[in-house]
Amino acid sequence: MPIRQNRSGIAVALRRRRASEDCRGAVAMELETFLEIVDLKGDLPVIPEVLTKVLSIIRDEKGSAGQLAEVILKDQSLTAKILRLANSSFYAGASKAPTNVSQAIVVLGFDSIRELAVGLSMFALLRDKKLEDYLGQFWVHSVACAVCAKALSVALGHEDTEEALVAGLLHDVGKIILLRFLPEEFTEIQILVDQGMTTEEAEEQVLQLRHQDVGEAVALRWNLPQRIVRCIRHHHHFAEYRKDDYSQQLGNVVTLANIFAMHYYPSSAIPLRVPTENFLDLARQHLDLDEDVVRNILKMMRRRVEEYLDIFGVTATEEAGRELDQIDTAQDAAARAQAKIYEMQHELKLKSLALRRVVDIGRTIISGVPIHELIERILEAIQSSTGADAVALALLNRNRGRIDGVAGVGYGIRPIVKRLHLPHSRKDNLLSRVIYDIKPINVLDVESPIYSKILSEWERSVWGAPAFTVCPIVSQGAGVGAIIADRRAARRALSDSEVELIGVFADLVSAAIDRYRKDMAPGASPSEPSPTPAPA
């Protein structure tokens, strides 16, 4: 599915570095340039008339419930969603279920309906069917953050709990803007996040700009309420808790709700893992909420998130939020500690066996065993140490300007490896990217849209694994090849520790290449038989 390509000028404006001590000022200038270009092109989503009128009523001290109801009724979709929300479990305590907007305003209050109208309208404004495949679980994460923020706001006794709902829903609006205008840079950021970087680190590396900055600037352009703008700006950082400062509390509510959503409803391939106890500690430290209160919130979250997802028309995977069902049954600290000890003992045993294999292979390198036999042993060691189903070695042939398959272990792998001949171009395939950057990449799902532009047909289809890892081979400071490994039978990705272990064996391949380089025919293909050549 095509995505609009980068606008000339926008990428340049965002990438432009300024040598200034005032980084915040530099960012502000980048944003201003960015928004001016967007305004000239007319590509920034335009707030619909109904939302403009709702915001006008909000800012008018004389704005009435009757005026608000009149505006909402002109939008049938908005009316239906507000009535569904008014009849949801969050408002089950109402004596009479509202059947029209006027009744909903009476039951929920003017402020609640006002905020719901803003949130629902902004949600409809930002959803773009052309981007749905690329956003994946983004909206699931946003709705989950919104629902949790509202629940925390209710627990704190806030009068205007819908403001927390809207702030939670829109906290990542900057990501939507970045995806619309800089799809290629957004893809680069997502790849870095899936490799373990934080979102902020990846954005700084690729754009020198954070999605919070973009979100704040766009929210200001749309004249959204100041407290919501502040939540968008600071949703990754807690402020010092002040019991009498509602604005500070609201910011901390959204920050904590975002952490909740990043764990149970992540928007990227790698969730933020926050144990329940840590979440309880954060709630106590930054919102002064009792542990039992927060446990009760977590227990009811999955049902409420699913209810809101249905109202907002968003579909989540079956696995989303499933851990929440275990909140009550996972409290036995002794059982958790025992399980952790067993896990550590098992991992230690595997590492001990792997270390033994590493030592044996190191001795083999010194003994002068033929390199093709040595490589076979290394690949088999990777397979047995990590539980991988398939492992292959590809080497760079600079004379031919391509990457060739050299060896492989695993059922039916050798014929597939023989078909591996990829051009050495960083933009055309993942192996080249790994060799150029000398950094491993753990592809968690080949069908993920973030890999659509960088996986070759061989990597996506011929190799035939739903997830795989690529680790670089380095010789004399340059990338000269890569190891590919997967666990295709289990249809799951290798863990971070297993990827690190593959990196150790990759270093052994590098040592073998350096050891045998002087005996190899210069310029020969890596796939030729004896004498097995080193990459040119």
Image (cartoon, grey):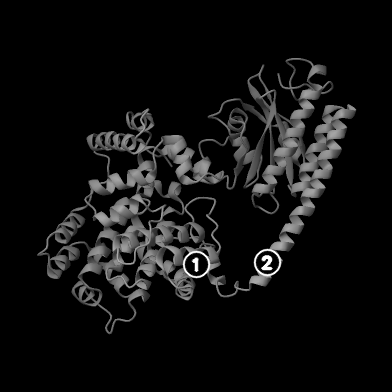
Residue at image mark 2: 337
Left or right of 350? Residue 130 is left
Front-lying residue, 430 or 257 = 257
Say what amino acid the circle numbered 1 marks.
Answer: Leu
**Which type of secondary structure does the marked residue at label 1 adopt?**
helix
Q: Position of residue 232 (x, y in %)?
A: 34, 52
Q: Position of residue 94 (x, y in %)?
A: 29, 81
In this view, which residue lies farthest toward the top? 522
**Which type of secondary structure does the marked residue at label 2 adopt?**
helix
Q: Please, is residue 172 above or below residue 11 in the view?
A: below
Left or right of 360? Residue 91 is left
How would you rate the neighbour count of disc 2 (Cα within 10 Å): few for under 14, some for 14-19, many for 20 or more? few
Left or right of 396? Residue 186 is left
Say what amino acid the circle numbered 2 marks.
Answer: Ala
Give the numbered dot on residue 280.
1
Q: Position of residue 397 (x, y in %)?
A: 68, 21
What residue appears at the point 77 percent right and 24 percent down from the top-left corner?
514
Q: Please, is residue 378 above or below residue 529 in the view?
A: below
Residue 369 seen from this side: no
Left or right of 228? Residue 63 is left
Are the residues flagged by discs 1 and 2 in contact, CB closer than 8 Å?
no
Q: In what quadrant of the picture does the N terminus appear? A: top left
- The mark nearer the N terminus, 1 or 2, is 1
Location of residue 532 (image quadrant): top right
What residue appears at the point 66 percent right and 50 percent down from the top-left corner?
495
